[in-house]
Image (spheres, rainbow, N blue to C red):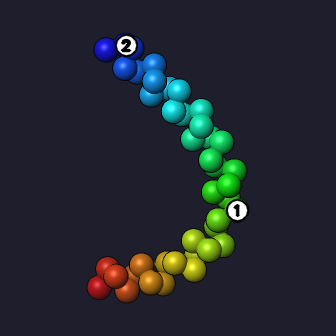
Amino acid sequence: MTVDQLPIIHYQLPITHYQLPITNYPLPITHYPLPITQSKI
């Protein structure tokens, strides 16, 4: 079971690498909050 948690930690490293590009997408994401609210109704 401990071996299964090892690969999980390996996936946390690449996730942090994706946080940089995600910050570049905050502008387009805000453009999508309006359509998202319409889908909730």
Callout 1: few (<14), some (14-19), or many (20+) C-alpha neighbours within 10 Å? Answer: few
Percent position of residue 17, x then y: 65, 42
Q: Amino acid at mark 1?
A: Asn
- Judge whether 6 appears above or below 8 on screen: above
Residue 40: assigned label = none
- In which quadrant is the N terminus drawn? top left
Tell me if 16 is positioned left or right of 41 in this view: right
Which residue is pictured at 62% across the width and 74% down the height? Answer: 28
Tell me if 9 is positioned left or right of 17 in this view: left
Tell me if 32 is positioned left or right of 40 in this view: right
**Badge 1 element:** loop
- Per the model, the C-alpha gap separating discs 2 and 1 is 36 Å
Percent position of residue 11, x then y: 51, 33
Residue 24: assigned label = 1
- Judge whether 38 appears above or below 1 on screen: below
User: Residue at the top extreme?
Assistant: 2
**Badge 2 element:** helix
- Judge whether 13 appears above or below 24 on screen: above
Q: Examine the image and state in which quarter residue 21 appears.
A: bottom right
Which residue is pictured at 63% across the width and 49% down the height? Answer: 19
The mark nearer the N terminus, 2 or 1, is: 2
Tell me if 4 is positioned left or right of 15 in this view: left
Q: Say which residue label 2 marks.
A: 2
Callout 2: few (<14), some (14-19), or many (20+) C-alpha neighbours within 10 Å? Answer: few
Q: Examine the image and state in which quarter residue 39 appears.
A: bottom left
Number of on-image labels: 2
Which residue is pictured at 53% across the width and 27% down the height? Answer: 10
- Judge whether 23 appears above or below 12 on screen: below
Q: Amino acid at mark 2?
A: Thr
Percent position of residue 23, x then y: 67, 58
- In which quadrant is the C terminus drawn? bottom left
Percent position of residue 31, x then y: 57, 80
